[in-house]
Amino acid sequence: MKKYIFFFLLGILILFSTTNIKANVYASAITVTYTGTFPASISYNLNQPATQVIITISDIAGTNVKTITITSGNGVNVGFNDVNWDGSLDGGGSATSGVWAISIKAVDAVGSDGYELISYETSPDSWFWSSSGVASNKNQNSPYFGMAYVTERTGGTSGHPGAILTQKGLYLFDSFGKYYGGQQNSAYAEGNSVIPWATLATDEGAPFGVTIGPDNRVYTFVLSSNRDAVKHGGLAVGDALWTTGSVKTILSFNDQSNHNSISDAIVVGTGADRILYTVEQTSIRTGSDDDSRTDGDGFDTSHVKRYALGNTSGLFTGPGEVVIPSSVMQQPFRIEIDSSGYLYVVQQSYDSLARANNLYGLSKWDISTLPATEMWHVGLNDAPDHFDSAANANNARATNFNGLTLDEPRGIVYITRKDAERPAHNVIAYNMATGALMGSFASGESVVGSVTTNLSGGGGSSIRDVYADAAGNIMIVNSSFEAFRIFSPPDGPNSFTTTSPTKIDIGNGVTDVEEISSGLPTKFSLEQNYPNPFNPSTTINFSISKSEFVTMIIYNALGQEVATVVNEFLNAGSYKVNFNADKLASGMYLYKITAGKFISTKKMLLLK
């Protein structure tokens, strides 16, 4: 059971918006604590130090009434910050009633001039034995905006000083690369207990990767290698914290009658429009690499597939649809889909197998109709030198790609290239519109000005995955340097504004919202409150058949808003609201719910 506590002395509104495309520093995990008397506490995380943070407080009409500027110490530090508002207003007086919105602008007046390491880099948080998947929540309306996720595929203890055992499973991180909750037993998602990772893809791939849907749910998947006596593949989903009760299997890990071993997955759409895209390996040989015919985890062929999941809550047994067959593209490995619906694909292949229009590193496709239409692909040598091992010295430069992410605000598609030792560049940027080479860097180095620092853990030839967060920072996992790291790109001065993850609603009572069932309702509904009449508390039940941003507002008989009961993104399910009207006068009230296109209003009577 999932429970959300709302203090309407502290009215919670889960709503993010951002400005400034050029941004690497940003605030996340914003929380406001107000107990009825000032000061109110405004806490937040910064993913890297800021030169300035500007907190703006505005009234219900959107007029800025208070500005708090911090330039040093608490408030601009990387990690947790906590700033007090004493209730005073810039024009004089103080906030005595009403709804007050808060936005936080983080500013870096200097920025980075090279790909600079900015993550926590402290034992044991950063160290993994063999991580293979990474993602970050970029959904601006989510309370978990900025949270990062890493998968450990084999389990073991890194050789870094201070490292501890990382079991197979999904791990949660704050935006700056520190364990969520401050320690590993908090960061290791409790839903890992639902999936028997230890018995799946025992060689190297359970879970292999992670992706986040637009409904804020987190999906993990399994990839088997040739060394596994039994081949596994499948996909599971859970809520943003991967709590035990939320984790469900969508594609079976053992019965692969409608799918194969999965090397990547993307989810688009919500509710009835939810579609899962996968890369599935189709030959007898499967695995995470394509080193040679004799390699223990090399694979031969794969294809891109999709499944119309809709509101499915359990196992999906439909056949799915092949989007790009292996006859068109022989070895796809990772995929991404941009906001316009275009598909990007990387392949793992060496030049001895590569041929134009089939085996190449990176391509972009129009999949609005099938068969898919290629828009561009990179040339076999459109990449910096790889300085590969002697056995593969003749490989084309733009081959053996194995990671992929999009930074849409900057129009960049990043890929990772395996078997490129430091100082060779193993993270490469291409133009999303044209496929033109834009730049690259070595993930085994941190560059600040003219100073290049070699990072611990070796050159990082076994880079596994890459992800661009909401502000354009580059997250990387690598089984060679056994670490999860975050780099700030060379963007120079930058800023990012995160608006109103919480609002302060002064003068109303205490309300809570509780999820009573995560089963998928067949329709949206709002029930009559009970008891009715009531004094002073009552319960309101409602159901939403797909994930939506939900508001429920209480009005008096004159149509004036007196309380906001719900104001957040909720997953499909059934909920109850316990509303306390202790501070309201007797009389008739209306409660109105809005969830996407669904709007419903009912009456209730308060008798004191």
Image (cartoon, rainbow, N blue to C red):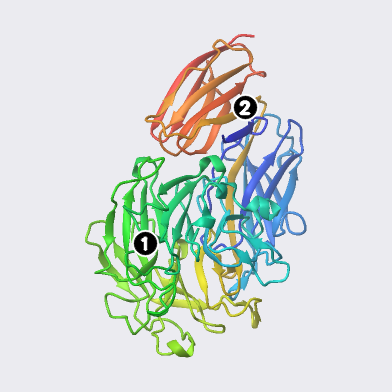
**Residue 261's x, y, as percent?**
39, 60
- Measure the alpha-carbon separation of dots 2 and 1: 45 Å
> Residue at point 38% right, 81% down?
350
**Mark 2 neighbour density, 10 Å: few (under 14) some (14–19) many (20 or more):** many
Relative horizontal placement of residue 374, taking residue 474 as reference (left or right): left
Res 337 → quadrant:
bottom left
**Mark 1 neighbour density, 10 Å: few (under 14) some (14–19) many (20 or more):** many
**Residue 480's x, y, as percent?**
57, 75
Q: Amino acid at mark 2?
A: Thr
Q: Amino acid at mark 1?
A: Val
Q: Which residue is mark 1?
A: 279
Which dot marks residue 511? 2
Res 169 → quadrant:
bottom right
**Residue 390's x, y, as percent?**
47, 90
| Residue at disc 2, secondary structure | strand
- When the figure is inspected, residue 441 is found, relative to residue 92, above or below; the finding is below
